[in-house]
Image (cartoon, grey):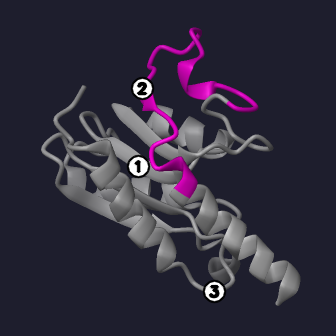
Amino acid sequence: MTGAGDPERLMRRALEVAAASPPDEVPVGAIVVDADGRELAAATNLREASGDPTAHAEVLALRAAARVHGDGWRLGGTTLVVTLEPCTMCAGALVAARVERVIFGAWEPKTGAVGSLWDVVRDRRLTYRPQVQAGVLEPECARLLVDFFESRRHG
């Protein structure tokens, strides 16, 4: 594994990012760190604000990290930390970017593609498969989402 740092510390940072989400966005936070644990990028979902169906936190963080990482689109040696299990689009993007490790918090049984509904990132047919650490600070990550959706129903 990379020397990217303590998964719980990294997830706490992703939770901070998620907590700063715009009010109409599902609060998901993603960060990308290099092999030394330096944050390269951080992002929240911006689908509503941008009108862009691909503006998931993970995709936005990967795009920003690629601009500063120094190896074009390849994000070798990096870790993507996200508060919610990535969907198929995001799982495909992190594989395509050659992210070394993905750490996520809450499981997403309806759309998750890193072990729940699908397991895109560990499909043996792929030529590249990142390391996965799941369920890091899961209760805190799930609570953020539960609170958001409850406020939408009762707000």
Q: Quadrant of residue 116?
A: top right
Mark 1 secondary-structure assignment: strand
Q: Give residue 65's position: percent from left, percent from top.
A: 32, 56
Task: Please tell me which residue is depicted at 59% across the width and 44% down the height of the picture.
Answer: 85
Q: Residue furthest bottom?
A: 155
Label drawn at residue 130? 2
Amino acid marked by disc 2: Pro
- Mark earlier in primary sequence (3, 2): 3
Q: Quadrant of residue 87?
A: top right
What stretch of residues is rendered in magenta? 116-139
Q: Give the CA separation, mark 3 to mark 2.
A: 32 Å
| Along the viewing direction, whichever of 122 and 49 lies nearer the viewer | 122
Q: Residue furthest top?
A: 124
* Other-residue count near label 1 (Cα within 10 Å), few / some / many at <14 / 14–19 / ≥20: many
- Eye-nearest disc, 1 or 2: 1
Q: Give residue 109's position: percent from left, percent from top.
A: 76, 40
Task: Please tell me which residue is depicted at 21% across the width and 31% down the height of the picture.
Answer: 2
Residue of label 1:
81
Task: Please tell me which residue is depicted at 25% across the width and 25% down the height of the picture.
Answer: 1
Query: Relative to 13, is 8 above or below?
Result: above
Q: Is residue 120 magenta?
A: yes
Residue of label 3:
23
Q: Give the CA separation, mark 1 to mark 2.
A: 12 Å
Amino acid marked by disc 3: Pro
| Along the viewing direction, whichever of 66 and 118 lies nearer the viewer | 118
Q: Give residue 127's position: percent from left, percent from top.
A: 47, 14
Amino acid marked by disc 1: Val
- Mark earlier in primary sequence (1, 2): 1
Q: Residue furthest left?
A: 36
* Other-residue count near label 2 (Cα within 10 Å), few / some / many at <14 / 14–19 / ≥20: some
